[in-house]
Amino acid sequence: MLVKSTPQTPRALWAVLMLLGLSAGLYAMFLAVDYRWNWSGVWKYRAQFGIGWLTTLGLSLAAMLVSVLLGFVLMLGCRARREPLRMLSGGVVVLVRGSPLLVQLLIGYYIIAEALHLGQPMLVGIVLLGAFHAAYLAEIFRGAVESIGASQLEAARAVGFDKAQTYRFVIIPQALRRALPGTTGQLVSLLKDSSLLSVIGIEELVQKVKVMNAASYAPLEGYLPLAAAYLIVTLPLAHLARRLERRFAYET
Amino acid sequence: MRLEARAVTKRYGAHTALDGAAFSTGDDARVIALLGPSGGGKSTLLRVLGCLLVPEEGGITLDGRALPHDEDGALIERRGNGFVFQGYNLFPHLTALQNITLPLREVHGMTATQATQRALELLHRLGLQGHEHKRPSQLSGGQQQRAAIARALAPKPRLLLLDEPTSALDPVMTGEVLDVIRELAEAGQSILLATHEISFARKVADWVVFLAAGQVQESSPAAAFFTQPKTELARQYLEGLSKYR
């Protein structure tokens, strides 16, 4: 049978070559520092690893939902006509973006949630993580919305759309495509930041791996599967985002 | 219709676009042309007359009825008008057909079937058969402007307002669009047209409002304006424009 060379073939070939090169390079480095592998030690903890992965996945998905919804509300707040509302939203964005997530988690859980008698670390963690990234998303959304030209807004007024209809039919569909690349990056960051939730007692993947490494006297073995477990989620996310971008593509 | 403006002032920051513009038309003006040099306030006056902008001072009456100054009232008023802009301003993420059907369904309460039927009828009448499902970027300038006119006409507006509809088009496309506007005028549509196409205005307009420096210099029946302009400014303007055509 004749093998046809499609444009896909060289791309796939390049990808395999690069992956092999990367693996060989890493392997050589480990060899150079004379690293002694101890896979059997960590293998015993595979169930814990799985539970940690599912925890990370579940809480990150929930926090993503919180961050997108809250980010949208904050963006609307930053564009509100009433000044106190604008000040409040703008202040939240600046404070949350400008301070470390670690501090927000510690104060948020041990002081604020405690004072409000919210005992659920998982729920509080999801809200805090979501809120942190919402502040970034609000600015990404605001940039996308404000890039919609004045002539489009005038056209929306001219055909008789009210404010809500203008957002729904004119601004959001066009802003969505422009916000997509930034949003994807932010959601990937969120997933990785979820590892910080161990400070409020949530046993997510990174925490599980630390425990697993310590218990099996294996300093690094757990971290390679850890990286793979994150990539399993982040790579398809990036792929999905690129496909969505293409679907929404149109010339302006 | 009878349009009347009293001391209309509209500012953009420090810039005063309309500086106490005042005029009134005859009782049965139907195709009104806004003429005058660029930067004279034509576009702003057109937007104020169509309730797309609310003036800071002064007011408009249309057949004796004062136009609203509040945003809600202006929205209702706008929904009875059709607008066409210099830059077409179609929605780039929608097809020509969707650009027309969306406002029909969402603003004018038509069913999807009614809206599609009305949109197709207009697209065909304006010579856009075969282009219904194209996005604006796939259409020529003239086709985009005809689609924009179809969108403005679809809800059967009392008044069609056109702001320099051919200024961004080459001569061939300008001809296509002017043909459409003339047919509409001849079919009895009430039209307010800001333009530099002086010979076209002469053919279709029955009333002329001449603006310069944010003020109305002259408001006359078209025949009188083109044969015997009252102001020196208007006379120079007409002379300058007809020099090479």
Image (spheres, helix red, strand yellow):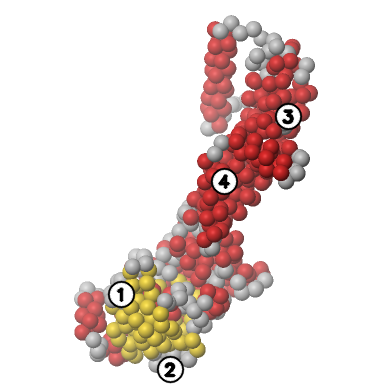
Distance Cα–Cα, label 2 vs label 3: 80 Å
Dot 4: element: helix
For the residues labelled 2 and 3, say whether their Cβ atoms are less than 8 Å apart: no
Chain of the residue under the numbered disc 3 shown in the image = A
Sequence-wise, which precedes: disc 3 or disc 4? 4
Chain of the residue under the numbered disc 4 shown in the image = A
Image point (73%, 37%), residue name: A121
Side of A131 where B204 appears, left or right:
left
Are the residues under badges 3 and 4 in a single subunit?
Answer: yes
Q: Residue beneath label 2, please?
A: B27
Amino acid type indicated by mark 4: Ala
In the rendering, at what x and y percent does residue B15 appear? 33, 69
Q: Residue beneath label 4, please?
A: A135
For the residues labelled 4 and 2, say whether their Cβ atoms are less than 8 Å apart: no
Distance Cα–Cα, label 1 vs label 3: 69 Å
Sequence-wise, which precedes: disc 1 or disc 2? 2
In the rendering, at what x and y percent does residue A6 appear? 55, 32
Distance Cα–Cα, label 1 vs label 2: 25 Å
Report which quarter residue A160 is drawn in.
Answer: bottom right
Chain of the residue under the numbered disc 2 shown in the image = B
Are the residues under badges 4 and 1 in a single subunit?
Answer: no
Image point (56%, 56%), residue name: A77
Distance Cα–Cα, label 4 vs label 2: 58 Å
Foreground mark, 1 or 3, reads 3
Amino acid type indicated by mark 2: Asp
Q: Residue beneath label 3, please?
A: A203
Foreground mark, 4 or 2, reads 4
Q: Residue beneath label 1, please?
A: B40
Name the foreground residue: A159 vs B222. A159
Name the foreground residue: B202 vs B77. B77
